[in-house]
Image (cartoon, rainbow, N blue to C red):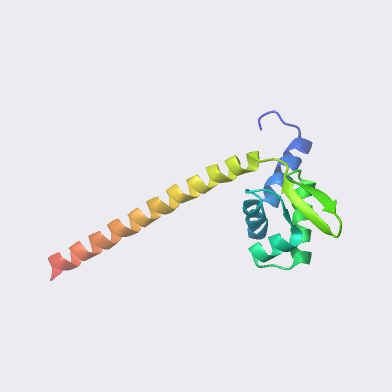
């Protein structure tokens, strides 16, 4: 990001902003195995077709998905699969942080239990 003009940073922020919505992440996960129509995606994500279409529009605007109309249905597929590598990197980071937090809580519990045993 070094030396990028403000306009480029704005576009990068918009890209990350579109990923900052859980329904959109569910949609991207649902498209990992191939293209799907809006109805299928709505069922998979537990949402309405109208809501899914709105989210897909945002993903398409950032170039993450492509849209293709076929008859009365609209199908979506991944346009930029590199987003999966980005999400996997972030998920790994969050998993490591969660694991550290769990370990810290466990050490705290052990210390408290040890302190009670010595006091009693």
| Apparent side of residue 84 relative to residue 65 in the rendered image (left or right) | left
Quadrant housing the N terminus: top right
Residue, far bottom: 120
Residue, far right: 71
- At horizontal 21% and vertical 65% (from top left) the residue drawn is 113
Residue 54 placement (x, y as % from top left): 78, 60
- At horizontal 79% and vertical 37% (from top left) the residue drawn is 7
Residue, far front: 71
Residue 103 placement (x, y as % from top left): 34, 54
Nearer to me, 52 or 68: 68
Nearer to me, 53 or 97: 53
| Apparent side of residue 111 relative to residue 37 in the rendered image (left or right) | left
Q: Quadrant of residue 56?
A: bottom right
- At horizontal 72% and vertical 47% (from top left) the residue drawn is 77
Residue 46 placement (x, y as % from top left): 65, 67
| Apparent side of residue 87 relative to residue 62 in the rendered image (left or right) | left
| Apparent side of residue 120 relative to residue 81 in the rendered image (left or right) | left
* Position of 55 relative to 61 (above/below): below
- At horizontal 63% and vertical 57% (from top left) the residue drawn is 26
Quadrant housing the C terminus: bottom left
* Position of 41 relative to 95 (above/below): below
């Amino acid at each position: 990001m070094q030396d990028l003009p403000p306009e480029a940073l704005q576009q990068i922020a918009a890209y990350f902003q579109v990923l900052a919505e859980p329904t959109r992440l569910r949609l991207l996960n649902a498209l990992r195995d191939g293209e799907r129509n809006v109805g299928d995606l709505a069922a998979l994500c537990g949402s309405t077709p109208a809501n899914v279409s709105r989210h897909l529009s945002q993903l398409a605007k950032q170039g993450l998905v492509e849209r293709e109309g076929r008859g009365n249905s609209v199908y979506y597929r991944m346009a930029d699969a590199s987003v999966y590598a980005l999400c996997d990197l972030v998920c790994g980071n969050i998993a490591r942080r969660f694991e550290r937090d769990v370990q810290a809580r466990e050490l705290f519990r052990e210390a408290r239990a040890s302190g009670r045993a010595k006091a009693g």
